[in-house]
Image (cartoon, helix red, strand yellow):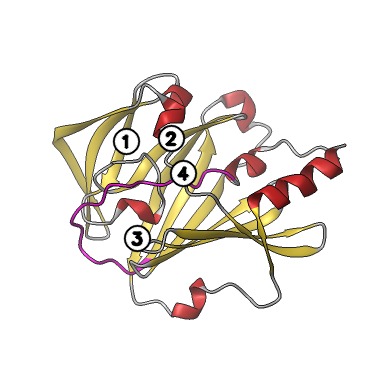
Amino acid sequence: MKINTLGFSLLFFLLVASTSFAQKSFSGILKYGVSMIDTNIQKLIDDREMFVYTNDTLSRMEILNDALGPQVSIKHMELKKSYLLLNFLGKKLAIQTNQNNDTARYEPYKIEYKLFGRKKINGQILKKATVYREDLKEVKTIWYFKNIRPDILDIYPGIKGLPADYYLGTVDGIIHYSIISVEEKPLEKDLFGIPSDFERITMEQFLEKVSQIEN
């Protein structure tokens, strides 16, 4: 059994931003569209949606994983702890992820903020920037939420706000994430818990399981 799909690539997209900025507290749900840039790959991999829930201390991300089914990641932003929740060969696993800053892996890495260019979605202000890093191959124009903390998703370490329209490079090609809607509302804390029937393991233990299957 070989696992090498967009969904499996998405498993490792959790990154860490070490710099914090003064954002307003935000609690609610963000909905993103997810699509491949390469038109040839688009024929093989369908567009999908990603949901991000946060109470400004905890975050929960949900997306369909092609290889492993529905995937959930839960993170405590103050404690810098995160888990991936998924079903793997009939087992429910909570995989503790390593939170290492990824900037060094994508040198050169550069963000330029634009003085002009802003828009709103559901009352939230988006600002414009350009980003370059090795996995993107070229400079990309992105948008980010001015008033929402960036480490809810941990994309682009050091960016001044949560990315709203952005790009990531994977082994399957460049993925485009674009915000669809924002709903500000209080969320129940239970949404961010790890169910008792999930086995907690390390990322190293999970990769060992994958390696055994592929061999």
In what quadrant of the picture does the C terminus appear? top right
How far separated are the C-alphas under marks 3 and 2? 19 Å
| Upstream in sequence: badge 3 or badge 4 | 4
**What amino acid is labelled 2 in the image?**
Tyr
Report if residue 65 is visible in the image. Answer: no
Q: Earlier in the sequence, mark 3 or mark 1?
A: 1
Q: Which residue is mark 2?
A: 167
The residue singled out by tag 1 in the image is 142
Give the labeled residue for mark 3. Answer: 182
Asked whether the beta carbons under mark 1 and mark 4 sit within 8 Å of each other, the answer is: no
Residues packed near mark 4 inside 10 Å, few (<14), some (14 to 19) or many (20 plus): few
**Residue 171 in the image: above or below residue 155:** above
Of badges 4 and 2, the one in the foreground is: 4
Left or right of 147, for residue 194: right
Give yes or no for contact between labels 4 and 2 (Cβ–Cβ under 8 Å). Answer: no
Residue at which label 4 appears: 100
Label whose residue precedes the other's in the sequence (4 or 2): 4
Whether residue 20 appears in magenta in the rendering, the answer is: yes
